[in-house]
């Protein structure tokens, strides 16, 4: 059986299947074999982790297809776009993926801009016109400001994952609920600040609120606080509308979107905001 390289960072971009879906996949492979090839880049598995696990456990042969990318960032972008097209993701996962896409493309452009120019010329894709945020906003049918906020959210989650990878997984899976604004605020946080937040989460003392300036404590019930909460409400509604557009795209492709999951997440965010006011 071909040796496959497992990359933890790539694997993390592939949300785990629920038990029922995994069992269904396993049953199908046991009955009919692995009909869909695994996708590799330089021998690294970038699509098909569940199929690979099932095949190795049951000694079932599989085929592979090798993809070509100029760098790791382009491979990351492919994984993200492939997952968004195929999976019913939660709002936090969609926001994280869009943010990682933005950050990966910015890094790819900075590291080797000639590759991006060649790709633009060869593919003539609208995705590669204009600023990165504007192009991705058009691509994902969201606001430009949403892409920018998603980038900060991804940075915040990445910072958490570098210290506590399991906490990052639980936040993305929804097991631990942390507001998007709070995650965005951690984008430029120090290691000490992130460790303090994680300590509060693990002890059960975490309050889903960005820290306030002690000097402005007297204004907590004043106009500044109201403006802050209204801005957060606007962000929640904007993100929900963006994610709903993605779901509509899934419907147009004949896919079944898990509307209850998305609506429940939206309601949870509103409840969290309500508890702060």
Image (cartoon, grey):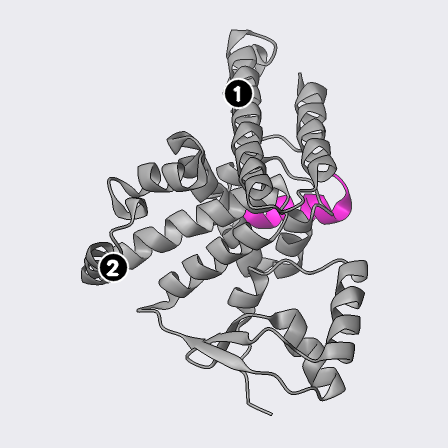
Q: Going by the picture, which residue comes out furthest to the bottom?
A: 1
Which quarter of the image is occupied by the N terminus? bottom right
Would you say 104 lies left or right of 18 here?
left
Residue 13: x %, y % from top left: 55, 59
How far apart, in angstroms, are the residues tagged by discs 1 and 2?
A: 36 Å
Residue visible at 62% across and 71% down in the picture? 49
> Is 83 situated above or below 4?
above
Q: Which residue is mark 1?
A: 234
Would you say 90 lies left or right of 23 here?
left
| Mark 1 crowdedness (10 Å alpha carbons): few <14, some 14-19, many ≥20 | few
Disc 1 element:
helix
| Mark 2 crowdedness (10 Å alpha carbons): few <14, some 14-19, many ≥20 | some
> Is 29 situated above or below 256?
below
Residue visible at 47% across and 78% down in the picture? 65
Image mark for residue 17: none
The quarter of the displayed image where residue 23 is located: bottom right
Q: Which residue is mark 2?
A: 119
Pick whichever, 36 or 208, lies toward us: 36
Q: How many marks?
A: 2
Would you say 22 lies left or right of 223 here?
right
Q: Earlier in the sequence, mark 1 or mark 2?
A: 2
Write down the region rendered in magenta.
193-207
Q: Closer to the observer: label 1 or label 2?
A: 2
């Amino acid at each position: 059986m071909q040796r496959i390289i497992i990359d933890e960072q790539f694997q993390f971009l592939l949300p785990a299947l629920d038990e029922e879906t995994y069992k269904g996949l396993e049953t199908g492979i046991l009955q009919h074999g692995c009909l869909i090839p695994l996708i590799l880049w330089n021998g690294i598995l970038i699509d098909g982790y569940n199929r690979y696990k099932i095949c190795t456990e049951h000694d079932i042969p599989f085929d592979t297809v090798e993809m070509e990318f100029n760098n790791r960032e382009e491979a990351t972008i492919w994984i993200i776009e492939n997952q968004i097209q195929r999976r019913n993701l939660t709002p936090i996962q969609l926001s994280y993926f869009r943010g990682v896409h933005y950050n990966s493309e910015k890094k790819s452009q900075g590291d080797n801009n000639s590759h991006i120019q060649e790709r633009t010329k060869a593919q003539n894709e609208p995705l590669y016109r204009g600023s990165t945020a504007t192009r991705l906003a058009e691509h994902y049918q969201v606001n430009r400001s949403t892409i920018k906020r998603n980038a900060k959210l991804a940075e915040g989650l990445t910072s958490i994952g570098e210290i506590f990878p399991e906490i990052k997984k639980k936040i993305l899976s929804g097991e631990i609920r942390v507001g998007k604004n709070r995650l965005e605020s951690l984008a430029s946080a120090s290691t000490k600040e992130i460790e303090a937040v994680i300590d509060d989460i693990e002890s059960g003392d975490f309050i889903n609120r960005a820290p306030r300036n002690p000097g402005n404590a007297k204004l907590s019930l004043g106009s500044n606080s109201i403006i802050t909460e209204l801005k957060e409400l606007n962000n929640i509604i904007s993100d929900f509308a963006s994610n709903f557009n993605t779901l509509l795209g899934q419907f147009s492709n004949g896919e079944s979107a898990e509307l209850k999951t998305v609506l429940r997440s939206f309601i949870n965010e509103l409840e969290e905001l309500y508890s702060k006011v």
